[in-house]
Amino acid sequence: MASRIRKRRLPLPSVYRQLEPGPVVLLTTAKAGRPNVMPMSWHTMLEFNPPLIGCVVSDRNYSFQALRATRECVINIPTATHLREVVGCGNVSGRRVDKFARFGLTPVSASSVAPPLILECPVNIECRVTDTRLVNQYCFFIMEAVAAWQTPGVRLRTIHHQGMGHFMIAGATRLLRSRAK
């Protein structure tokens, strides 16, 4: 007879900690020539080709107005070595602080959009908003990647937010051959 596994109720506000969607990224926006950066972990791939990305940016965030107005951004993927800068960017508002200066991040001109890339991030994805139908109700933007960059030779040890100040760092990877391309 199999032993019974005991479970306890999981509080509903903790569900997101179990389904954490992916790495924390640094979203850069620019409005009226003023760049800003914010950490974001609520994003998902929607399509492979063209690459479509969905993301939630709260209407309480300073970046929301810039993204809604300009319909452009860059998704920058930091590594674990920049955890303190990522957390710092999330703890202050771009309304009052130049986060690039405060946290030692280097803005680099993008090729297709006005917001800058972040030099210290080994992956940068330039995006344009293509669908705003879910923005008013859910703050959900759908964007198309229009250019992407990576720094060769950098091991991408990504940061994953688990809520309440807890982070997981991506570990070992495995390669299993697949027919998918």
Image (cartoon, helix red, strand yellow):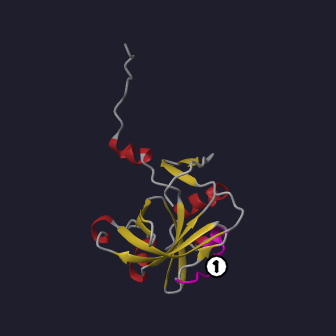
Q: What amino acid is at disc 1?
A: Val
Could you say whether the residue bearing mark 1 is in a helix, strand or loop? strand
Residue 15: x and y in percent read 38, 45
Residue 29: x and y in percent read 50, 76
Residue displayed at 40% across by 48% down: 16
Picture layout, residue 169 above or below residue 110: above
Indicate the quadrant where residue 133 lies. Answer: bottom left
Towards the viewer: 18 or 3:
3
Residue at the extreme top? 1
Residue 98: x and y in percent read 58, 74
Indicate the quadrant where residue 58 lies. Answer: bottom left
**Which residues fall within the magenta stretch?**
100-112
Towards the viewer: 26 or 143:
143
Q: Residues within 10 Å of mark 1 (few under 14, many from 20)?
A: few
Residue 53 in the magenta stretch? The answer is no
Residue displayed at 45% across by 66% down: 48
Q: Say which quadrant the N terminus sits in.
A: top left
Picture layout, residue 134 above or below residue 116: above
Residue at the extreme right? 153
Towards the viewer: 99 or 45:
45
Towards the viewer: 102 or 6:
6
Residue displayed at 38% across by 23% down: 6
Residue displayed at 61% across by 48% down: 173
Specify whether residue 56 is in view: no
The residue carrying mark 1 is 108
Residue 150: x and y in percent read 64, 69
Specify whether residue 22 is in view: yes
